[in-house]
Image (cartoon, rainbow, N blue to C red):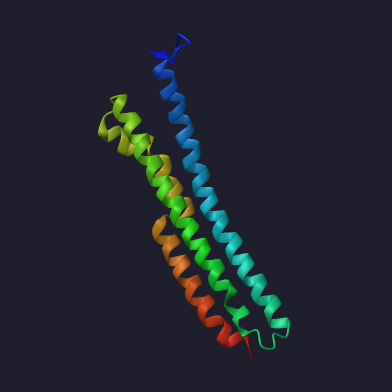
Amino acid sequence: MTAGSTGKQVDYEKLRVEQYKSLRKEAMDLATATRRIETYIIGATAALYAYLTKESLQGKEWVWYLPVLLVSFGAWRSRRLFRRLDDVRHEYHHIEGEAKIPKWTKDKSSWAWVESTKKKFGGPWTAILLWAVLLIFSVVAPRFLKN
């Protein structure tokens, strides 16, 4: 296969192997990024509440609900990362299909690293639960912390 008008030969198989490796690294990076977002948002929310409990906010009661925006942003970003991880998984399986790797092999060995990542970092359901609890907390907490 030639690339463009340069006449250079492109080794398609080598290109797909590199893409395969790149997708694996991207999936691992996405899982790590999701965990980091959770950690940073929890830390930022706690720090903001700690600051707000020490400062007098006369007439600025709306400031107590800023953590709701932080948590909402974190949930939105986490959702986008999980969607991208799903896209990576589909592309990964497409490459395996082109290489004619049997389905049982795909399901049990080559994609097993993603399943182990889900166990290590938690999957989308644990993230949904975390964000739901944080959102409820960020809405309810100001009622208790204001006093």
The quadrant where residue 4 appears: top left
From what the image shows, is residue 79 above or below residue 64? above
- Can residue 6 be seen here? The reply is yes
Question: Residue 96 placed where, x, y %?
Answer: 33, 30
Foreground residue among 8 and 11? 8
Question: Which residue is most to the left?
Answer: 103
Which residue does the image show at 43% across and 30% down from the upper left? Answer: 20
Foreground residue among 58 and 107? 58
Question: Residue 23 placed where, x, y %?
Answer: 45, 35
Which residue does the image show at 42% across and 46% down from the upper left? Answer: 85
Check the picture and name the quadrant holding the C terminus: bottom right
From what the image shows, is residue 36 above or below residue 147? above
Question: Residue 138 placed where, x, y %?
Answer: 54, 76
Describe residue 19's horizontal placement relative to residue 40 as left or right. left
Question: Which residue is most to the right?
Answer: 55
Check the picture and name the quadrant holding the N terminus: top left
Question: Which residue is most to the front?
Answer: 5
Which residue does the image show at 65% across and 84% down from the upper left? Answer: 60
- Can residue 109 be seen here? The reply is no
Describe residue 33's horizontal placement relative to residue 58 as left or right. left
Question: Which residue is most to the bottom?
Answer: 147
Foreground residue among 85 and 2? 2
Which residue does the image show at 64% across and 76% down from the upper left? Answer: 49
Labels in figure, total: 0
From what the image shows, is residue 3 above or below residue 122? above
From what the image shows, is residue 78 above or below residue 16? below
